[in-house]
Image (cartoon, rainbow, N blue to C red):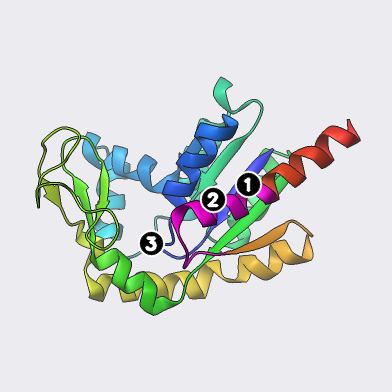
Amino acid sequence: MRIILLGAPGSGKGTQGDMITTKYGFPRISTGDLLREEVVAGTPLGEIAKTAMERGELAKDELVIEMVDKRIQQDDCRDGYVLDGFPRNIPQAQKLEEIDRTREVVIEIFLEDAVVVKRLSARRICSSCGMIYNLLVKVPERMGVCDSCGGKLVQRDDDNPEVIQERLHVYHGQTEPLVEYYRRNGVFHRIDGDDTMQSVFEGICQVLDDALSETESQN
């Protein structure tokens, strides 16, 4: 089963994806993480991705699809996987269906734009281990220092308000049409993201449990 998490930047897709992985065992695949790995490695793709992310833009479809295709061919994705940040538009969704015809469950974590800006402006990331904090809801014990490894907490270049607004503009223009696309396909579910982390996860689990039960009954 393929689980696709939709939602604006800052909606909590990464956190919820990790929780899905812990409970159900499906690996979370984040195109953002894949791109950042390329940036850290200093590859040609990483240089292109770095420029795009600093501007609040998206990497080209062909590059992202190539990375995702390679990742989902790995053994840990055999029984299912969670996609966080992909697909971003209808052409990507259609290409994904071509390369892997497994059953889809699409969940949108919905947030208003004002909440997104507030959340992302408060996000901090450990420069050493990658642990994510939020000065609104997940505050480190020592300001600016990671609880896990003692590394320095930093704000990503694309988490300042101006870039966030551009990212939201891109999201609404390119990704929101996916909602109607998946709704027509009968696989779309919307969860209110402006709630506690656990409440959002409980809503997601209800959707996934129903889908798994239906799959088992068909087999």
* Mark pair 3, 2: CA separation: 15 Å
Label 3 or label 1, whichever comes before in sequence order: 3
Q: Position of residue 140 (x, y in %)?
A: 18, 48
Q: Are marks 1 and 2 in contact (CB under 8 Å)?
A: yes
Residue at the extreme top: 75
Residue range corresponding to the magenta coloring: 192-206
Mark 1 lies on a secondary structure that is: helix
Above or below residue 149? Residue 171 is below
Within the magenta stretch, is there residue 152? no
Residue displayed at 26% across by 41% down: 131
Residue that mark 3 sits on: 10
Q: What is the quadrant of the N terminus in the image?
A: top right
In this view of the protein, can residue 83 be seen by the observer? yes
Q: Main secondary structure of the magenta part?
A: helix
Q: Position of residue 53 (x, y in %)?
A: 29, 58
Mark 2 lies on a secondary structure that is: helix
Instruction: Tell me which corner region of the image, top left, top right, bottom left or bottom right, holds residue 191.
Output: bottom right
Q: What is the quadrant of the C terminus in the image?
A: top right
Q: Amino acid at mark 2?
A: Phe
Circle 3 packing at 10 Å, graded few (<14), some (14-19), many (20+), is many
Residue that mark 1 sits on: 205
Q: Amino acid at mark 3?
A: Gly
Q: Which mark is residue 201?
A: 2
Above or below residue 129? Residue 9 is below
Mark 3 lies on a secondary structure that is: loop
Residue at the extreme right: 218
* Mark pair 1, 2: CA separation: 6 Å
* Mark pair 3, 1: CA separation: 20 Å
Q: Is residue 197 left or right of residue 20?
A: left
Q: Are marks 3 and 2 in contact (CB under 8 Å)?
A: no
Within the magenta stretch, is there residue 202? yes
Circle 2 packing at 10 Å, graded few (<14), some (14-19), many (20+), is some
